[in-house]
Image: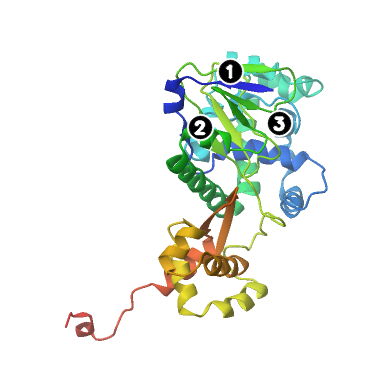
Amino acid sequence: MLRIHFTDADYAAVRLREGPDAMWEVLLSLHVLQQTDETEEFAHWRATVARELDPVAAGGLFPLTPPVGYSPDFLTPTGAEGFEPGLEQVLATPSRRMVRELGRLRPPRASAPYVRSLAAAEAKPLRLLGHALHHYHETALRPYWPHIRQCVGAQSALRSRVREEGGVRELLGGIHPAVRLHGDVLRVPYPGPDRDVHLGGRGLLLIPSFFCRGRPICLRDPELPPVLVHPFEREAGWRVPTRGDGRLPTRAQLAALTALLGRTRTRALAEIGSGCTTGELARRLRVSAAAASEHATALRRAGLVSTVRSGRTAQHALTVLGEDLLHQRHRPSHPRDPSATAET
């Protein structure tokens, strides 16, 4: 069990990341790639990446990122905005820290030749690490990043709403079904011996993650800025999209789009554009909650909207395809006669 101890100052300093953290998604997706479970959520993504990834270029990453157990904290620097800045921070890790954290890897990974050469602070292994991370990101994450960003952004918007309406304690207690806030201690199921983390006024950064599965995770070193990375609730049948999703509609989406050629659903698409719950959509459209839910469901089936849930609350947001369609429908016209644009 992980026990995170809060003070009043820590509650005030709780922060929620608004979008995906590129380096955490790199690490956690590497965990998913090495897992062999039979769930369908990541099956297509795993098969595609395994086929396209260069085993020579990316092979050095696997000893560093076991799917179970410790992965070095320096692989997920806090505060990096985007992959390139994050990569720079990883490669700038002080050698003493790198050696210390690599030494925490379990055998036989800790004794792998690449890990030993990296721990020796040699220049070539460090360059290879940079190349490996870059190749992996380009192959496994960049093609899917619009969808990752959209899913995590919708989750962040939902959690922000929970904080605004219920306060920080409700936010903390609702980040995962197994997480409980008892008094001023956040209890998080965690493997291994019990751990206590005293925030001491530093607060806590909550990071919703696309590839995080099962339970929340955190950094091992208690001296590093405190973070808690957590999965989000996925609907039944949820899967990582194929490479083309969010760009060109499939036949099924084209068929579903024929049901969207009405005024109300066009308005619903526009109202969801900035993100909203089912209740808010109902109020904006002046329809019942059941009708708003029906419209959102039809839009979601067509690939225009995604939905994340927290308890009974559903937060809707546009997918890339939905944003493109809305943009095209609201693109200003360009009349041939300039005088046609004059006000009358």
Estimate how packed mark 2 is, as few (under 14), some (14 to 19) or many (20 or more) residues with alpha carbons within 10 Å.
some
Q: How far apart are marks 1 and 3 (CA)?
A: 23 Å
Estimate how packed mark 1 is, as few (under 14), some (14 to 19) or many (20 or more) residues with alpha carbons within 10 Å.
some
Q: Which amino acid does label 1 sit on?
A: Val
Estimate how packed mark 3 is, as few (under 14), some (14 to 19) or many (20 or more) residues with alpha carbons within 10 Å.
many
Where is residue 123 shown, x and y percent of the image? 60, 23
Q: Which mark is residue 65?
A: 3
Where is residue 141 shown, x and y percent of the image? 62, 47
Residue labelled with disc 2? 169
**Observer-nearest residue: 275 or 303?**
275
| Pointer 3 or 2: first along the chain | 3
Q: Does any portion of residue 272 appear in the rendered image?
A: no
The answer to whether 113 is drawn above or below residue 313 in the figure is above
The answer to whether 114 is drawn above or below residue 322 in the figure is above
| Pointer 2 or 1: first along the chain | 2
Q: Which amino acid does label 3 sit on?
A: Thr
Tell me the SS state at disc 1: strand
Residue at x 76% of width, y 30% of height? 68
Residue labelled with disc 1? 197
Q: Does any portion of residue 14 appear in the rendered image?
A: yes
Q: Pointer 3 and pointer 2: residues touching (CB < 8 Å)?
A: no
